[in-house]
Image (tube, helix red, strand yellow):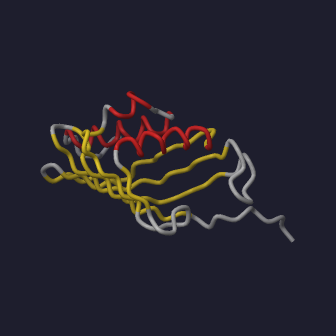
Amino acid sequence: MPGLPQHPHVETAVRYHEAVARGAVGEELARYFHACVVQEEFPNALFPDGVRRDLSDVLESAERGRALLGHQRFEVHNAVAAGDQVAVEVTWTGTLATPMGSLPAGHVLRARIAVFLEFRDGKICAQRNYDCYERLVRDQDPV
């Protein structure tokens, strides 16, 4: 993470994304969140109506993601902190472990994501994601 500010909330935000990439679930993931966390994922290719989650929903979603993805990675490009708020710019890649719709196992999903985190008592109490997925189509054979 060379070049990123060393604000304690930025460090937590990066560690949180690393934990998600490792497939953290349960208590390992919950330790990053305040009990009253609200996570919002605004409309995107996977969730056209968006989604709003509390802590139990976040943990349940992580379990589903762990089963769906064989591997995922977050590349943090930038992070900015002001007080108890952090904005993070990342590129995410995830390799499907199982088929998803018309996409076969092994297909690589990609998204550029802006994540806005708010902290309380050193833990994430609010997360807003703006996920921009690359086209979700199966690669075509060259003509």
Q: Residue furthest right?
A: 143
Above or below — where is 19 with respect to 88?
above
The image position of residue 137, as x and y in percent, is 69, 65
Residue in the picture at 29% in, 39% down: 33
Q: Quadrant of residue 28?
A: top left
Q: Residue furthest top?
A: 27
The image position of residue 41, as x and y in percent, is 41, 59
Above or below — where is 73 with respect to 27?
below
Above or below — where is 101 with respect to 68?
below
The image position of residue 88, as x and y in percent, is 33, 53
The image position of residue 35, as x and y in percent, is 26, 39
96 displayed left or right of 26: right
| Residue situated in front as seen by the camera: 81 or 23 | 23
79 displayed left or right of 106: left
Residue in the picture at 40% in, 48% down: 76
Residue in the picture at 79% in, 65% down: 140
Where's the C terminus, which quadrant?
bottom right
Q: Quadrant of residue 128?
A: bottom left
Q: Quadrant of residue 27?
A: top left
Where's the N terminus, which quadrant?
top left
Residue in the picture at 47% in, 46% down: 74
| Residue situated in front as seen by the camera: 107 or 43 | 43
Q: How many marks?
A: 0
Q: Residue furthest left?
A: 83
